[in-house]
Image: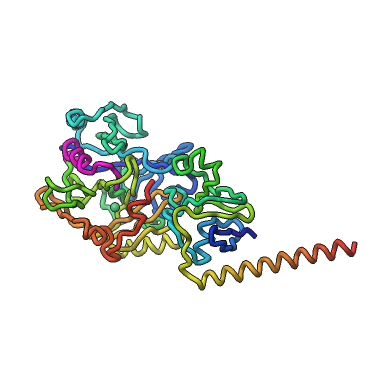
Amino acid sequence: MPTVTIEPSGEVIYLEPDETVLSGLYKAGYAYTIGCRRGGCAICKVDCRAGEFHYNRPIADTVINETERADGTCLSCRAVPDGDITIEMRGENVRLVNPFLRQINEKARLRAEAKQAADAERLTSTTTKE
Amino acid sequence: MAVMRMGYVHARVTDLAEAKEHYANTLGLYETHSEPGKVFYKGWDEWDHHSVVLEEGGVGVAKFGFKVEYESDIDAIEKKAQDFGLTVERMSAGDNLEVSDGIRFTSPSEHVFEVYHSQKVIGTEVGTHNPDAFPRHLVGVGVPALDHALILAENVRKMEDMFKAVFDFFPTERVQTDLNDDDAHFIASWMTCNNQIHQIAVLEGEQSKLHHFAFKLDNWDQVGRAADLFSMDDVPIDIGPTRHGITRGQTIYFFDPAGNRNEVFAGGYPAYRDRPINKWTPDAIAKGIFYHARELNERFTTVYT
Ligand SMILES: [Fe+2]
């Protein structure tokens, strides 16, 4: 259950597996500068400060150049986190435009965390019995 | 009699399989040829072999093709292009699949334009003998034809001059800083060579870039239906359905799976060479572009491929 932490405010957003950073943030009620949402216009770049991600589609070299492929540049509409990641916005901050969606996302995160903890505990107790 | 129309757009896409899903199944173009890394399409009401070519690798536009009526027009346009200061090269029949010989040049905006006089004729999907009104089994939106394109250029006035001098186009509408053309800076220009309100438009912006290419629809109903289909197929809608103040067209801007902007465009009033040009000043540009929202979203000038 990947989470995206947004610096500098430190907000934590829960993403479904295979969900892109952009999709996750918008579904959680946040907005920032985005364009085509299909990897072509390059406007939704953010910086990845910690953690790993991959692109779920080929990205044109005119959109992400060779340097950007290694320097943490993250084209958020095509970037899928491999685990928890931390991102920093470029030249703006995310805006919380829908607190209702934010609340739904927060509950989804807590549920997922609780389930993970329960699964871990079940695994531990099974191991102990053997 | 020189250029008849913009005949084809050759665009780049990052994933050909996804692009095919969009252009064939959502927009309903007819595939006329496919080879590794490339696909050719036409709309149901087009008779030439193709109006859209998609090539895998990158995004944006590779080139545009303009069709002239007679073979002899090619020489005349070559001469006009050279007189305008462009470097023109000859292309051979077959350089483009099923397209005749012709010429190729790079515009001052760094877009590649080709001029040709014929393409293999396939015929419309309803034929010419006692034709029906439309094909019964259209797929998705079922766009009948390519309509126009909007490209970006650093120097809009120069591009308008080029289209006038080389292709004998005329502007129908413009965004300009002053109503007096001599004093004005041209921000955008909409141009055509026939009664279609525009075939090409140029907006001030980054050289060689594509803003969008558009497909024809008949009316509001069809535009609304297209929007429904875009929701069904998870096509990102940029704006619309709405109207453009400029051209009066009814429209949706949306994105293909590679992020190239497409449009469906209906209506628009008939263009005439002697009709006075509609001039929009920057204070009304938002209403000119998006007649209902009257607000120029940030994406209009910042998002392109
Ligand atoms: Fe358009």
Q: Residue furthest front?
A: A8
Which quadrant of the rendered structure holds the N terminus of chain B? top left
Number of numbered discs visible in the structure rendering: 0
Q: In this view of the protein, can residue B24 be seen by the observer?
A: no
Q: Is residue B88 magenta?
A: no
Look at the picture and state if B144 lies above or below B103. below
Residue B204 is left or right of residue B27, and the answer is left
Q: In this view of the protein, can residue A56 be seen by the observer?
A: yes
The quadrant in which residue A125 appears is bottom right
Q: Return the x and y of residue A94 as percentages of the image width and height.
A: 48, 61
Q: Return the x and y of residue B72 as percentages of the image width and height.
A: 18, 30
The quadrant in which residue A17 appears is bottom right
Residue closer to the observer: B195 or A77: A77
Residue A111 is left or right of residue A105, and the answer is right
Residue closer to the observer: B145 or B90: B90
Question: Start and end of the magenta stretch?
Answer: B150-168
In the image, what residue occupies the spot 41% across and 41% down? Answer: B12
Q: Return the x and y of residue B39 as percentages of the image width and height.
A: 43, 41
Residue B123 is left or right of residue B35, and the answer is left
In the image, what residue occupies the spot 15% across and 52% down? Answer: B178
In the image, what residue occupies the spot 51% across and 59% down? Answer: A23
Q: Is residue B164 magenta?
A: yes
Residue closer to the observer: B192 or B52: B192
Magenta segment, prevailing SS (helix, strand or loop): helix
Q: Return the x and y of residue B296 as percentages of the image width and height.
A: 30, 59
